[in-house]
């Protein structure tokens, strides 16, 4: 991303810890990948998936419940734009208890940005093969930067890793992929990004109008956040870990007990919140992430059991072996996996994505994103190429 980091704000006075409930997004998008649009809306408890898995498949990884999206009265493009905005004010006030006059006053200063629509229409994962996508994140500068960042923050990172089971190098890798270790957090006003996408991008309007409402709710709960001043990605993600407003509300953590959650610049909170995002999406302490796989000669290409884009690790390894996919010697082995096929430098590559690979993908749905985070984490820890 060719973005300039915003100035570091001074830390305001301490506020009470919130027990409130967010797309890790938390997180989300940089200019190089599409928004991390996770599904969620309840507080930190993880909801069990009620759907039974198909015969022979493992049950799905339990996920948080779906977060609310804005209703058709706010997002239907057939409705006049001014009326949709008026309906949004009513929806936000009724749903989150935000003063409607405050919502109207802030929206009056919002601007539609065509550049944001253009960026949303060309995510890197949609146009780049793995052989071109990988070098963006797996390179000497990003690896050495990650090692230096880890060394500078080792005590705080290792403490969070011990408490949550999320290895420190994965927390560092998320920050490295999302914002180059906090150097590039986005120069779009979050208000403009969400306003533009809520009222000018019908395909995703329910999600982004929901996030815009969540932004007002977040500012109500975290009054140190000045909505018009917040800067972030073209999709409205904020801070070092690029949390969407709802991710911020749901899963942000006070990492050092100072009584508030600051995901913009305060590293202890950022580290704890990224780890918590992984935990609530099902991270398995000590579990494998991914394994390089071999495809048997003559085997058909893998087809997921449900959604063709699903990364759910629902196939037992013996079943994958029957289909012709086995982990290479020395690679980690898990209970269940899915198969990822990518076009690498040397041709077609096959990988087995385990439960923790799926969890990384809740930050961003692209398998290339998850593999880049994994490989960067391994390199930062001195285990990768």
Image: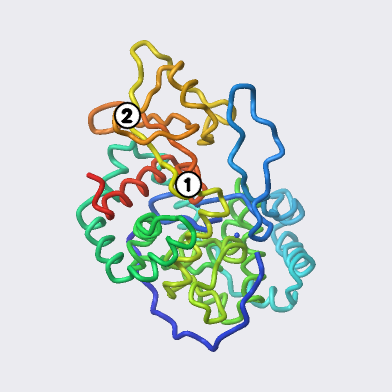
Q: Quadrant of the N terminus?
A: bottom left
The 10 Å Cα crowd at callout 1, few under 14, some 14 to 19, many 20 or more, is few
What kind of element bears circle 2? strand
Which residue is drawn at the image coordinates 59% and 28% (left, top)? 306
Q: Quadrant of residue 199?
A: bottom right
What kind of element bears circle 1? loop
The 10 Å Cα crowd at callout 2, few under 14, some 14 to 19, many 20 or more, is some
**Spot occupied by residue 6 in the image (x, y as percentages of width and height):** 39, 74
Q: Is residue 178 visible?
A: no
Q: Residue furthest bottom?
A: 13
Q: Residue furthest top?
A: 298
Q: Is residue 349 visible?
A: yes
Q: Quadrant of residue 295?
A: top left
Query: If you read the primary sequence from the N terminus, does the residue marked by circle 2 or circle 1 appear first?
Result: 1
Q: Is residue 93 left or right of residue 11?
A: right
**Spot occupied by residue 12 in the image (x, y as percentages of width and height):** 51, 87
**Spot occupied by residue 69 in the image (x, y as percentages of width and height):** 69, 53
Q: Which residue position is annotated with label 1?
A: 121
Q: Alpha-carbon distance for marks 2 and 1? A: 27 Å
Nearer the observer, 294 or 343: 294
Nearer the observer, 1 or 218: 218
Q: Which residue position is annotated with label 2?
A: 349
**Spot occupied by residue 3 in the image (x, y as percentages of width and height):** 35, 65
């Amino acid at each position: 991303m060719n973005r300039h980091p915003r100035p570091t704000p001074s830390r305001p006075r301490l506020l009470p810890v919130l027990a409130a409930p967010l797309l890790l997004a938390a997180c989300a998008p940089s200019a190089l990948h599409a928004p991390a649009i996770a599904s969620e809306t309840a507080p930190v408890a993880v909801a069990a998936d009620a759907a039974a898995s198909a015969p022979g498949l493992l049950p799905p990884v339990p996920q948080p419940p779906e977060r609310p999206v804005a209703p058709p009265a706010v997002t239907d493009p057939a409705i006049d734009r001014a009326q949709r905005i008026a309906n949004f004010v009513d929806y936000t006030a009724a749903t989150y208890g935000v003063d409607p006059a405050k919502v109207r006053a802030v929206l009056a200063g919002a601007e539609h940005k065509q550049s944001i629509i253009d960026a949303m229409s060309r995510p890197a994962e949609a146009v780049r093969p793995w052989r071109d996508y990988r070098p963006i994140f797996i390179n000497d500068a990003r690896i050495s930067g990650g090692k230096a960042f880890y060394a500078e923050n080792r005590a705080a990172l290792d403490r969070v890793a011990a408490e949550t089971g999320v290895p420190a190098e994965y927390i560092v890798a998320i920050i490295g992929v999302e914002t180059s270790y906090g150097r590039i957090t986005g120069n779009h006003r979050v208000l403009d990004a969400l306003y533009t996408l809520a009222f000018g991008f019908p395909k995703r309007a329910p999600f982004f109008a929901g996030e815009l409402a969540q932004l007002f709710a977040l500012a109500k709960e975290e009054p140190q956040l000045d909505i018009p001043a917040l800067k972030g990605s073209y999709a409205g993600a904020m801070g070092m870990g690029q949390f969407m407003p709802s991710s911020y509300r749901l899963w942000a953590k006070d990492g050092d007990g100072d009584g508030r959650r600051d995901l913009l610049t305060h590293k202890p909170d950022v580290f704890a919140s990224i780890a918590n995002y992984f935990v609530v999406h099902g991270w398995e302490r000590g579990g494998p992430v991914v394994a390089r796989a071999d495809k048997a000669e003559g085997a058909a290409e893998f087809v997921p059991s449900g959604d063709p884009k699903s990364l759910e690790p629902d196939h037992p390894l013996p079943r994958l072996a029957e289909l012709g996919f086995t982990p290479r010697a020395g690679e980690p082995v898990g209970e269940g996996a899915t198969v990822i096929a990518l076009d690498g430098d040397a041709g077609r590559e096959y990988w087995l994505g385990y439960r923790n690979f799926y969890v990384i993908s809740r930050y961003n749905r692209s398998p290339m994103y998850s593999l880049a985070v994994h490989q960067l984490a391994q390199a930062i820890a001195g285990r990768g190429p």
